[in-house]
Image (cartoon, coloured by chain):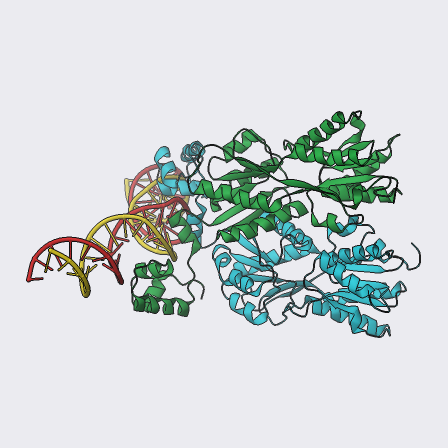
Chain colours: A green, B cyan, C red, D yellow
Amino acid sequence: MGDMSLKDVAAIAGVSVRTVSNVVNRFPHVAPDTRARVERALEQLNYRPNLAARNLRRGRSGLIGLVVPEIDSPYFSEVAAHLVLAAEERSWTVLVDQTGGDPARERAFLEGAAAGFVDGLVFSPWGLGAADLRRGAEDIPLVLLGERTSDGVADHIAVDNVAAAVEATEHLIGSGRRRIAAIGLQPHLTNETARLRLEGYRASLRAAGHPSDEQLEIRVAALHRPDGAAAMRSLLTLPEPPDAVFCFNDQLALGAMRAARDAGLDVPRDLAVVGFDDIEDGRYSFPSLTTVSPDKWAIAVRALECLAERLDGKRSESARDIVVSHRLIVRESSGPAGSP
Amino acid sequence: MGDMSLKDVAAIAGVSVRTVSNVVNRFPHVAPDTRARVERALEQLNYRPNLAARNLRRGRSGLIGLVVPEIDSPYFSEVAAHLVLAAEERSWTVLVDQTGGDPARERAFLEGAAAGFVDGLVFSPWGLGAADLRRGAEDIPLVLLGERTSDGVADHIAVDNVAAAVEATEHLIGSGRRRIAAIGLQPHLTNETARLRLEGYRASLRAAGHPSDEQLEIRVAALHRPDGAAAMRSLLTLPEPPDAVFCFNDQLALGAMRAARDAGLDVPRDLAVVGFDDIEDGRYSFPSLTTVSPDKWAIAVRALECLAERLDGKRSESARDIVVSHRLIVRESSGPAGSP
DNA sequence: CGGTCCCTTTGCAACGTTGCAAGACTTCGG
DNA sequence: CCGAAGTCTTGCAACGTTGCAAAGGGACCG
């Protein structure tokens, strides 16, 4: 029942294949009674256009790809949800894939399978640098999320990571913290997000006259809760442990908070914690998590705008570099020191 | 550079289109030097097969659809991650869509756009009942997640919700709780999951000789943290509030825990909490969350097995009803009463 | 009444791929 | 040296759709 073609419908309705196609595509010049007859036949046979054929003919699939390192990471799944919703308004369907941040797999998606299906790609790279991206970007419209390539490889959307990190750190300084750690360095990745956040963190400390201390800058293998917890535990072994920590994402922060509590510390009395991403968990955790909230809805919408422009053939050259807004959301985890 | 066809490659290599196709598809009888020449041309032109054409010709797309109510709900995003990974092993790509649980949209996905692209569908319905599902299931292989249709509409995968709810409730009873509430009834949905968990909950109470009390059974509009928090607040206004609560998913539980703390209660001393799904947040929350953990990996793998069987033409008739295992993971939130 | 224009319908070709079956050439056994 | 059984290569057609261009028919204008 699902594999009826225009030919079948045409036979039933007693018209040509082309006329049925005209009805399906809402071509205006179709006689009312013909249209009615065709529509009856369409209904009767439960006709659905074969999208492969249509795609082949039109050269468009109506699919866009979202390629992220981890779809089950709350930040990415929230972005994915927004993107799917925003795509619907443009009658686009979203194909989601995850790379695990593996460069080889990222390259494969960029050049390979996904590229054949989709009209455009929204891509959040971890492992690939600008050079690799350029080669993959040749074929189809590409929007990068969260990576500051700044060299015009492709359209690019991100928050101002340095400014955001500055705000987060200054907030901690302003609430009286003296010894502020950072969790989330990822020197092994070509992705620059962590580097930029670190830059903002260091700049704030310097501006406030705090001594810089590399012991307080903790690198992690991944951005998950266990990594945050492990980082916190290592910080607590220091002779002079921190009284605040800026985590480069919320999952690290939640893990760090948990580890701090397990060690008998009270958050925020003994330790203030700030995260990044504003995932939903942080709003309901105990204590609730102070965090930098990127405008995820804007990220999704602007990404689709970029794709649409490329697909329409406008602006085929210069790459855009879009900065979406963010704001620091102060919650319990960074309350005043000393008081419970 | 990305729109080179077999014809272009054939011209460069000085062979027929068909021979190039043979090389691409690893047809064994190709002379070594011909193969070398063709492969050089493929490389040179950076040939990628046009998947729309291949799909049209073969009648297969290599895409499977995952349709869930909310992709940003941790449970669904974790299942999605597993599914994408498992699909990779079969060289399938996953197309993700979300319906918001809206029956109209669920029907649209089932009958409409997605169905044209994909070879099979993994579907987690909220709004559609068995009757609607049957009509949509005609065309393509379909696997249902989490819905106990039990009438052979389509293959179906779920945990034993009743048994799991019994275990959760018995655990609370066994740890000395007397007045156990339930949060998560959804009488407005045709989805039966909540009904089954309620059934298990009631059965346990009955078996233990606890009086049943409808005041303790709280319905929710959605399964999110705010709903759990609101439900908890309403429970706390009762003349005789509960000393334990079984939440039908972890998000409700996390919201409920948060609301309980805000009201000055200590979890687990004053209130024990058990959730369902074992999302990662619950492992690192404070206190960590006791929960029923379904085997999500098995869900993904078995779902793909079902699709593969249908696609291979085996077992075209009888629908499978697969029960995946689960286990109760006891953490801090349901520790002994009375002690902090 | 002839010509022009518009409305409606249609046939043909093409998108890039692969199934089919036959053709060209080689090898081998008798 | 012939026939059979391979190995290798190819042309043709088809998948279902839509762009193009033209044909048939009616209405309207001069």
Vertical placement of residue D30 versus A210, above or below: below
Q: Residue at x 65, y 55 (%)?
A: B76
Q: In which quadrant of the rendered image does the N terminus of chain B lie?
A: top left
Q: Nearer the viewer, residue A54 or B19?
A: A54
Vertical placement of residue A64 versus A157, above or below: below
Q: Position of residue B61 (x, y in %)?
A: 48, 52
Residue B235 position by quadrant: bottom right
The residue furthest right is B339
Residue D16 position by quadrant: bottom left
Q: Residue at x 83, y 38 (%)?
A: A233
Q: Residue at x 80, y 28 (%)?
A: A215
Residue A106 position by quadrant: top right
Q: In which quadrant of the rendered image does the C terminus of chain B lie?
A: bottom right
Residue B66 appears in the picture as rendered: yes
Q: Position of residue B46 (x, y in %)?
A: 45, 35
Q: Position of residue C16 (x, y in %)?
A: 39, 44
